[in-house]
Image (cartoon, helix red, strand yellow):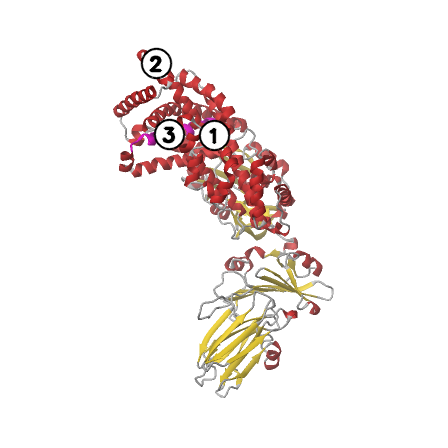
């Protein structure tokens, strides 16, 4: 209790000092905004403020700490980043960084370790407090990884030391007590115990259970050793195998881990980029994946990759080919799934997932048996358990070490992989099905475990709960004693010692789980029905415990997996391998401080925050058009992304393209894009990838002079029959007008069909030919002349071009004949006005035709065309 009070006071003292002292003015600091993808928002680029000084990369302490879920406090001497509230992911604890110093402090359980040292000092200035980016993430139970110029940041997750803290704070909740948790009095418990004991013995006699016969004889001497032995063996079996609750938490953890390979995120996209050479062989697939891992290794410090969950999942999948060599049948089954997958990401996902589960299941098999053996062997004379209990487990553990594979989830995975995949698209979803949880969890052990033939009866459950509560008490005493001894001195906090604590913590929590689970099973159906909220509450406690068990079983003696977080000895290793220049380079700041805008394209607001500029009144058919220094950009109506950009300044880059770059370098950067040859003879180049397009122009010295980007606009569908977006149908006086586009199928042509009321058909086909790719058109009918008869307005766009792409026809249908009132294209625009030189978009406002297009300065403007009643027109001044 004193330690808890001290911890609270320590945090309170750190927060209470908040007087800010400005540092001396420093002129050599450079500030940037970099693209970041957080693991709780995969596929969505966010921004993070960083400061560069002496090639060191700093993060804004308040922005980073808050985004990670912590509170941030600033005093005269240090900034504190802490959490004192219960949270599923963010650990309870405190980390401090001292200004103008490399000194840092970090809480390990209840001990404040002040031996931490950052690779460079923390800075406080008029722009905020700046802490070492990579280093601070490690102390805050996070990490970073750079993939394709994007920083991937893991949200904080609790390590094993944090579990010790949660157990300390919630121990009274985790410990199961019949009276406190279920409401069974000591008298009732005693009565239930006696009745259960007699019923068990009687059932055993009827079933010729040898131990029951022995017990009936030993009863006269009040010796319960036979049943002590029997139930301790049963407890050992439950202890060393998965409960359904643990499997559920395993699935939850695997879901979270595999989400890093979501095709929307940077890592998933990097994996999917390997799609050029699909391979149906697992060995070759793993080699290819290893190539990707090697590329990531080049772009990241070793210390970064060692702590990052995304990287660990990738590494785990890549390095486990040996696992399949020991499981030929599973190799064949997974190989079949790989061959049938359509994309490399899907193929990789199947291998990564099965290897991930297999690895977790193997850890469970080994860790649980060893933890139980360690606990029993080391119990002293103060133990509550009888010698018969102890000896029963000691003897049975020996059997389990050789037979555990019979009961393990790994065996079930190997034997039933094809059935599991048949039931769901992937393993994680399949394991999440209730039916499969039951197949692997305790409730279906009857196929392999003798005493589970018919499941546990209420009587068996009560007896198991009684016996488990004895082990629960003993294991807590052992765990608490060892934990307090090791954490009494910071120097004792080593991976070897933490592994010992973890085994004892696992043992204690597993017995808490078994005791509660068996106790709930002992209740009659009537009792369960009467108190559903109580049952749900107790099950929720076990769900929380199961999550800890899943994590604790991955403890190791070296902290190689960083299961204990960032320890003082890891700090020393980190400083020895720290590479300042590499860290500065990997955050994605291009050479000569060129600004890479690629990561913000999917969010107009984020792009605007990063690039800036002024909103223009002339939007050129865009919802917004921004004009900045050397750059203009905008978004289409109702679009949240950046849809069109024009760049002439050399400080920006996009998909590896920048002004001043050699044309051949630009072509290499766009090697995965499809080249359009429309304007190469004019020194202009266009490339497309999915719905995105990039163009650039070159100077005489073959360097890029300007470039741009645009997305395909989603065509508005005014089709009365609600057909697809490439078909339009509208009605007017005396006729029905239909426009049908062959896009996206080649060749791109547009056909306009006008069907008169008398059945006559007028038809026009628009086809530019192969050289230009063809047309995609849309139609509307509006009375432009004011004579009460609607005109037909047909707008055609050249597929795959931005250089004055639109062509506009205004037709009048009169007496069954089609008359052209106006034909607009770039050439006509140049002849009739100096205001714009392209025809990019049209709008009809108050029966006037608004034509929007580019100016000679690559801005946007428009002209207004007014029609007279006789069909003639003029440009409105």
Disc number lying in front (1 or 3): 3
Question: Are circles 1 and 3 on residues that touch, CB within 8 Å?
Answer: no
Q: Which of marks 3 and 2 is nearer the N terminus?
A: 2
The magenta-colored residue range is 502-524
**Residue nearer the viewer, 25 or 556:** 556
* Magenta stretch, main secondary structure class: helix
Q: Name the residue under label 3.
A: 454
Q: Does the magenta stretch include residue 519?
A: yes
Q: Name the residue under label 2.
A: 223
Q: Position of residue 116 (x, y in %)?
A: 55, 35
Q: Name the residue under label 1.
A: 407
Question: Are circles 2 and 1 on residues that touch, CB within 8 Å?
Answer: no
Q: Which of marks 1 and 3 is nearer the N terminus?
A: 1
Q: Position of residue 61 (x, y in %)?
A: 51, 46
715 with respect to 676 (left or right): left
Residue at (68%, 56%) from the top-left corner? 668
**Residue nearer the viewer, 339 or 125:** 339
Disc number lying in front (3 or 2): 3
Disc number lying in front (2 or 1): 1
């Amino acid at each position: 209790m004193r330690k808890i009070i001290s911890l609270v006071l320590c945090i309170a003292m750190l927060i209470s000092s908040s007087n800010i002292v400005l540092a001396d003015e420093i002129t050599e600091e450079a500030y940037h905004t970099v693209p970041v993808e957080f693991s709780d928002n995969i596929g969505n680029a966010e921004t993070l403020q960083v400061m560069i000084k002496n090639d060191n990369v700093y993060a804004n302490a308040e922005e980073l700490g808050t985004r990670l879920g912590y509170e941030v406090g600033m005093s005269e001497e240090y900034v504190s980043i802490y959490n004192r509230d219960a949270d599923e992911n963010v650990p309870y604890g405190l980390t401090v960084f001292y200004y103008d110093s490399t000194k840092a402090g970090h809480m390990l359980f209840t001990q404040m370790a002040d031996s931490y040292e950052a690779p460079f000092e923390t800075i406080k200035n008029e722009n905020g407090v700046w802490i070492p980016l990579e280093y601070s993430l490690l102390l805050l139970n996070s990490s970073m990884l750079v993939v394709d110029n994007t920083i991937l940041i893991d949200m904080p997750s609790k390590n094993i030391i944090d579990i010790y803290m949660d157990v300390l704070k919630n121990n009274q909740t985790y410990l199961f007590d019949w009276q406190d948790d279920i409401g069974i009095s000591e008298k009732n418990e005693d009565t239930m115990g006696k009745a259960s004991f007699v019923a068990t013995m009687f059932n055993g006699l009827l079933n010729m259970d040898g131990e029951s016969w022995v017990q009936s004889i030993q009863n006269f001497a009040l010796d319960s050793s036979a049943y002590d032995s029997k139930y301790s063996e049963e407890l050992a079996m439950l202890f060393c195998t998965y409960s359904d609750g643990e499997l559920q938490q395993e699935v939850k953890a695997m879901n979270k881990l595999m989400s890093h390979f979501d095709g929307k995120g940077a890592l998933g996209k990097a994996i999917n980029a390997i799609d050029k050479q699909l391979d149906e062989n697992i060995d070759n697939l793993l080699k290819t994946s290893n190539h990707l891992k090697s590329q990531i290794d080049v772009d990241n410090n070793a210390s970064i990759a060692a702590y990052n969950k995304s990287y660990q999942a990738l590494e785990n999948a890549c390095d486990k080919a040996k696992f399949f060599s020991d499981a030929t049948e599973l190799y064949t089954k997974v190989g079949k799934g790989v061959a049938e997958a359509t994309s490399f990401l899907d193929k990789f996902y199947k291998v990564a997932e099965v290897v991930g589960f297999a690895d977790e299941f193997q850890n469970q098999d080994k860790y649980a048996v060893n933890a139980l053996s360690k606990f029993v062997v080391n119990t002293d004379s103060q133990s509550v358990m009888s010698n018969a209990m102890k000896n029963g487990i000691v003897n049975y553990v020996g059997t389990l070490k050789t037979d555990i594979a019979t009961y393990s989830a790994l065996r079930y995975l190997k034997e039933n992989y094809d059935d599991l995949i048949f039931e769901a698209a992937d393993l994680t979803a399949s394991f999440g099905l209730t039916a499969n949880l039951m197949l692997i969890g305790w409730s279906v052990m009857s196929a392999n475990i003798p005493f589970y033939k018919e499941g546990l009866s209420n009587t068996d459950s009560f007896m198991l709960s009684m016996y488990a509560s004895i082990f629960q008490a003993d294991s807590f005493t052992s765990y608490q004693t060892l934990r307090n001894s090791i954490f009494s001195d910071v120097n004792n906090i080593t991976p070897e010692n933490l592994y010992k604590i973890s085994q004892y913590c696992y043992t204690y929590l597993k017995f808490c789980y078994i005791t509660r689970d068996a106790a709930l099973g002992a209740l009659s159906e009537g009792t369960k029905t009467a108190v559903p909220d109580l049952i749900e509450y107790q099950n929720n406690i076990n769900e929380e415990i199961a999550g800890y068990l899943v994590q604790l079983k991955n403890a190791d003696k070296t902290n190689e997996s960083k299961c204990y977080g960032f320890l003082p000895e890891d700090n020393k290793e980190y400083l020895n391998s720290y590479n300042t220049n590499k860290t500065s380079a990997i955050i994605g700041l291009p050479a000569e401080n060129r600004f890479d805008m690629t990561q913000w394209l999917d969010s107009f607001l984020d792009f605007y925050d990063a690039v800036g500029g002024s909103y223009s009144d002339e939007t050129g058919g865009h919802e917004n058009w921004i004009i900045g220094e050397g750059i203009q950009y905008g978004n289409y109506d109702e679009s949240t992304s950046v849809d069109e950009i024009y760049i002439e300044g050399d400080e920006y880059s996009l998909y590896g393209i920048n002004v001043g770059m050699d044309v051949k370098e630009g072509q290499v950067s766009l090697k995965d894009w499809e080249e359009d040859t429309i304007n190469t003879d004019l020194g202009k180049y266009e490339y497309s990838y999915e719905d995105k397009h990039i163009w650039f122009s070159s100077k005489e010295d073959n360097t890029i002079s300007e470039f741009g980007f645009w997305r395909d606009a989603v065509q508005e569908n005014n089709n009365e029959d609600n057909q697809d977006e490439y078909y339009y149908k509208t009605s007017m006086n005396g006729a029905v007008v239909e426009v049908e586009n062959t896009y996206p199928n080649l060749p791109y042509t547009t056909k306009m069909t006008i069907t008169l009321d008398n059945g006559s058909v007028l038809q026009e086909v628009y086809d530019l030919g192969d050289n230009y790719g063809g047309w995609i058109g849309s139609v509307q009918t509006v009375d432009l002349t004011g004579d009460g008869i609607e005109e037909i307005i047909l707008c055609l766009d050249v597929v795959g071009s931005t250089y004055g792409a639109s062509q506009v026809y205004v037709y009048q249908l009169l007496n069954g004949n089609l008359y052209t009132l106006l034909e607009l294209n770039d050439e006509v625009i140049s002849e009739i006005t100096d205001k714009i030189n392209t025809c990019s978009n049209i709008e009809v406002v108050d029966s006037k035709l608004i034509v929007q297009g580019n100016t000679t300065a690559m801005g946007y403007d428009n002209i207004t065309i007014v029609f007279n009643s006789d069909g003639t027109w003029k440009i409105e001044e």
